Image (cartoon, rainbow, N blue to C red):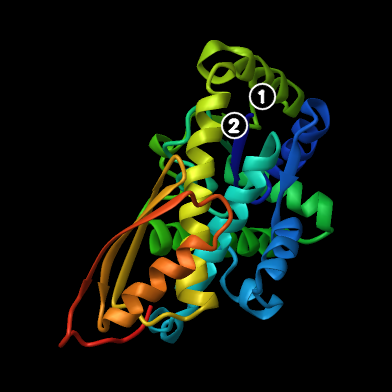
Amino acid sequence: MAIITLSRELGSLGTEIADTLSSRLGYSKLDKESLEVLLKKLGMTEQQFVRDDEKKPGFWEQFTQEKDRYFAFMKAAMYRFAGEKDCIIVGRGANIIFRGIPGALKLRIIAPPKVRVARLRERLGIDDQHALRMIHQSDHDRAGYHKYFFNALWDSPAEYDLVVNTAAISPAEICSTVSALLRSPTYAEAGDRARDVLRDWRIAQDVTIAIVYRERVPVVSLDVVCDKGVVALHGAVQFSASMDRCVEVAGTVEGVAKVVSYLEVVEYAYYAGM
């Protein structure tokens, strides 16, 4: 099992490189279109996806539950997709979402502004000013998305394993380099460990969605941890019945072998939802 996350600047040829890697390696690709399909299956509407995809929520949206719902469903979709096949996941902060997964290769594709402008001008038939505006807006949205959802810098090299400038290195050379890296012991021998970790992450995320968004059990706070199918529920509820309901719902989720509750009843806590 192998996972590549690919972050890209507009005009860096990142999308083209993702397509080439997918074809050469035989990896499945998760991008905007295929992620939207998965999210719809999980219950998210197209409007919700378009509003939050790779951009910071608007001012008032930051105070609603929708941003949390979007993020929870997106992680669930990514975990399930990556757990089923070797894959490339394009954008959406996947490098941070898969941080801690053994052998996940976090790749970032960049290019100088002048090169990006020239590529957009040629590809879209627009002038330099228009191309530059598109680049600035794209960079602003993606940086804001990473800052808001992950408190991370989108363009920080420390968040990636490999940062490549396509003004100096061709897509073919990049694909050859990535292929060689995936054959190295660091990545090739991590598959089984990655599969186990990802399975537990997927179960924990599915439990969270089942309790909070599907069954709408009233909780003050909830943190779900899974280890080899054993699910631990941490957090607080207002009523003991809610605590029992959380345990009941968690037990129905695929892959859960046992549920252990560390939930506490907080009688006078102010409940604002999740």
Figure quadrant of residue 20: top right
Residue, disc 2: 165
Q: Residues within 10 Å of mark 2 (few under 14, many from 20)?
A: some
Q: In this orientation, which residue lies closer to the viewer: 11 or 70?
A: 70
Q: Do the residues under discs 2 and 1 have CB atoms within 8 angstroms?
A: yes
Q: In this orientation, which residue lies closer to the viewer: 111 or 268?
A: 268
Provide residue 212's location: percent of width, then percent of height. 45, 74
Q: What element carries label 1?
A: loop
Residue, disc 1: 169
Q: How crowded is mark 1: few (under 14 residues within 10 Å), some or many (20 or more)?
A: few
Q: Distance between the residues labelled 2 and 1?
A: 6 Å
Q: In this orientation, which residue lies closer to the viewer: 178 or 193?
A: 193
Provide residue 258's location: percent of width, then percent of height. 42, 51
Q: In this orientation, which residue lies closer to the viewer: 9 or 5?
A: 5
* Residue 99 drawn above or below residue 61: above
* Residue 152 drawn above or below residue 161: below
Number of marks: 2
Q: Is residue 132 visible?
A: yes
Q: Is mark 2 on a helix, strand or loop?
A: strand
Q: Is residue 128 left or right of residue 190?
A: right
Residue furthest left as drawn: 268
- The amino acid type found where label 1 is placed reads Ile
Q: Can residue 139 be seen in this view?
A: no
Q: Which residue is drawn at 81% across and 26% down?
A: 24
- The amino acid type found where label 2 is placed reads Asn
